[in-house]
Image (cartoon, rainbow, N blue to C red):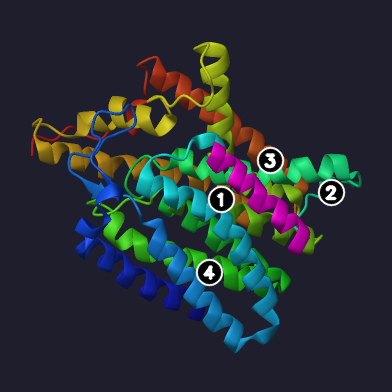
Amino acid sequence: MFSFLVSFVVSALLTLLVIRHSTLHGPALDSNFSGVQKVHAHAVARIGGLPIFLAVTLSAAISAWRVPDLGYWLLALLVCASIAFMGGIVEDYTGKVRASRRLVLTMLAALLGYLVLDAKIARLDMPFSSWPLDSLWIVLPLTVLAVAGIANAVNIIDGFNGLASVVTIFMLVSLAYVGWQVGDMFILVSALTVAGATAGFLVWNYPVGLIFLGDGGAYFIGFMLGELALLLVMRNPQVSTWYAALLLIYPAFETIFSAYRRMFVRGKSPAVPDGIHLHSLIFRRIVQWTVGPKEARALLKRNSRTSPYLWLFSLTAVIPATVFWRNTEVLIFFSLLFIISYVWLYARIVRFKSPRWLIWNKKTD
């Protein structure tokens, strides 16, 4: 908990500092209110990833000083993550780093992790057996795509105040718990450090949205999440590979489903943004009915009320993954159940047949 508390306090203070001096970050102020994925009504600094990154770096340095054996691993992980972070933070400041280039940088970060941390997908657990993956031509691209994919997936679900932050905190706490269960101190400390820094940022992001996570924050947290999940599973054979799959299934399947929807349903490039992600549909077709007067403050209320739906939905994967982290058969079952639930829920909402139990009573405040 020491790592969590240090990174939480440092992140909260640094985030407040960024907010108080937001005028110094003029190029990083998000003042575009007309985009298909925009739901805010005033200019907001989108560099929340900067205080998170600095808080994790400081907390990791303190942890390495207290436990020297962790020094190499923490330093190597941060060096790898900084590559993914830089692509995102430069985009936040300039708006000139294309998504393809950010993805390439994240893939380079994953490649470096493969080389210096030995972070690779070396096996696939199945009921009654475990399939080793020995071919470099399979392991390397699979590893790079998996880690970079998770980093990009976190960026995709970062659509509303507190959404990506809370979901990733759930996942990081789960990683810390399982790391503690198997005695992996590196995973425990790293996961708590990132979770604490993200929670410190969350204080100022939810519900009022005084600062946004930005691409830098989303890519950094997403990379750390994917890398730590991979390292936990591969360093500890008693942890099923399906634990990582189920733990990360919400952002991962959101990305896969979005690519399918854009390419095969709408006939467009998977890189073209749209406003019909699951969280966007919940915002427009469920949460909007919970606020009466159409005032400026109503937008804020609907924004803050959207994320809890997805928090609860993500827990339907995170909780069973955490409880059954070594039981491959049960983890596969819950993975399939989550996919079926996601598709069913999306189909109901997109056809204007949202389940009534999802709609709160309309208020006239």
Residue 163 visible in the picture = no
Q: Does 201 appear above or below 271?
A: below
Q: Which residues are magenta?
A: 101-118
The image shows residue 217 at horizontal and vertical percentages of 44, 54
Instruction: Tell me which label, 1 or 3, sits earlier in the chain.
Output: 3
Q: Which mark is residue 318?
A: 1
User: Marks 4/1: CA distance?
Assistant: 16 Å
Eye-nearest disc, 4 or 3: 3
Q: Residue 295's x, y, as percent?
A: 8, 34
| Label 4 residue SS | helix
In the rendered structure, which amino acid carries the disc numbered 2? Arg
The 10 Å Cα crowd at callout 1, few under 14, some 14 to 19, many 20 or more, is many
**What is the distance, in whole Å, between disc 1 and disc 2 at their CAs?**
22 Å
Q: CA distance from mark 4 to mark 3?
A: 25 Å
Left or right of 345: which side holds 280? left
Of helix, strand and loop, which one carries label 2?
strand
Q: Which residue is mark 3?
A: 145
The kind of residue tagged 4 is Leu
From the image, state whether disc 4 or disc 1 is nearer to you.
Answer: 4
Amino acid type at mark 3: Leu
The residue tagged 4 is 192
* Residue underneath mark 2: 123
Q: Give the spatial CA distance, label 4 vs label 2.
A: 26 Å
| Left or right relative to 321: residue 141 | right
Circle 4 crowding by C-alpha within 10 Å: few under 14, some 14–19, many from 20: many
